Image (cartoon, helix red, strand yellow):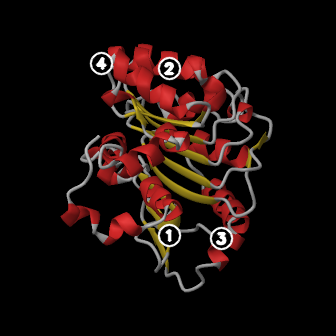
Amino acid sequence: MTSLPSSLASSPVFALNSDILWRIFLLNTYMTTKFDEDIPALDTLRYTSQVCTAWRELTLQSPSLWGRVINIVLLWHCDEWRDEVIRRTRSSPLYLKVPRTDPAVTYVAVSLANENWSRVYSLDILSFHPKEEKAWTDLLRRPSCLRHLIVRTATAADDFLDSFSISDFPSLETLDLWDSHKVPLDNGDHRQPGTNQHALAIVLPHLQQINIRSFGYIGALLAYLGRISPKEGCTLCFDGVSVVQPDVSPRAVSDILEKFLQCSQKTLAATMEAPVNIQLVRNQIEFSINSFRSIYRIFSFKWSLSILLQESRPSSEFLSLTIS
């Protein structure tokens, strides 16, 4: 590798010590930010390793950095580069991201995850085809040290959660699940939650954040949330649209809000200045707490009824909601 021109070598950034540089490089490895879509963390780390000899030595001696940037879409088509990136991770935890639904990509991703399942800490997947989803749920039936599960799926969220036992991931810290499932209106499937294999308590002592967005069987999801025993301080961001009836009762909403507000007291106490927004209107409930320190909501619960069902729902049914 060639040395830097003198004009660049004198830049203050090259006077930073290795610890500070490493922290900067670490910030660039986060694949959960929106910037990763345009500037993938894997590419950033690769270019960083090519700046100069010192930076290359630091990145190649930091396997944990490489373990955080396993974006399969950038690796699936090139066996040589994929093998090199995995070699650079050594035995470090792996953060896998699969932002494309494609059989070839999924095959490579599942194979890689299978081979390294004991050190997969984060799984961030987009899966809209039944065969691909089955490959992922088969993998998720294997216990592991998984800490972050982020899924975008076409399957109803409660069905996806019922396809494996989340209790097999006792180290789980984040559960982030969005579905785009469209339940046919008046399909006669008014399922009664609580009759599946997850009827017992789900103990997740490290779970800190739950994010769920669903269009379907909201009552079943609320029942599932009611079984979870998370870490003290765990916060909830829930956005559900009911498209079947009867589905959600005021009591179920109140119970979940009460449970997670109590659970998240310590986290919310750190943002006492945060504004609270509560809206109870016909066919919709919205409750949120924002933080002045962040653009993100730290706690939110939103439920609404499908527009096509609103005419058949009594207008006063949810106006009697009370939060304990």
Residue located beneath label 2 in the image: 112
Sequence-earlier tag: 3 or 4: 4
> Which kind of residue does numbered mark 1 sit on?
Ser
Residue density around tag 1, few if under 14, some if 14–19, many if 20 or more, within 10 Å? some
Residue nearer the viewer, 9 or 213: 9
The vertical placement of 116 against 21, above or below, is: above
Q: Nearer the viewer, mark 2 or mark 3?
A: 2
Mark-to-mark CA distance, 2 and 3: 36 Å
Q: Is residue 197 left or right of residue 321?
A: right
Mark-to-mark CA distance, 2 and 1: 39 Å
The vertical placement of 64 against 71, above or below, is: below
Residue located beneath label 1 in the image: 288
Residue 285: x, y in percent?
Answer: 48, 63
Residue 216 visible to an observer of this rendering: no
> Which kind of residue does numbered mark 2 sit on?
Leu
Residue located beneath label 4 in the image: 77
Sequence-earlier tag: 4 or 1: 4
Mark-to-mark CA distance, 3 and 4: 43 Å
Mark-to-mark CA distance, 4 and 1: 43 Å
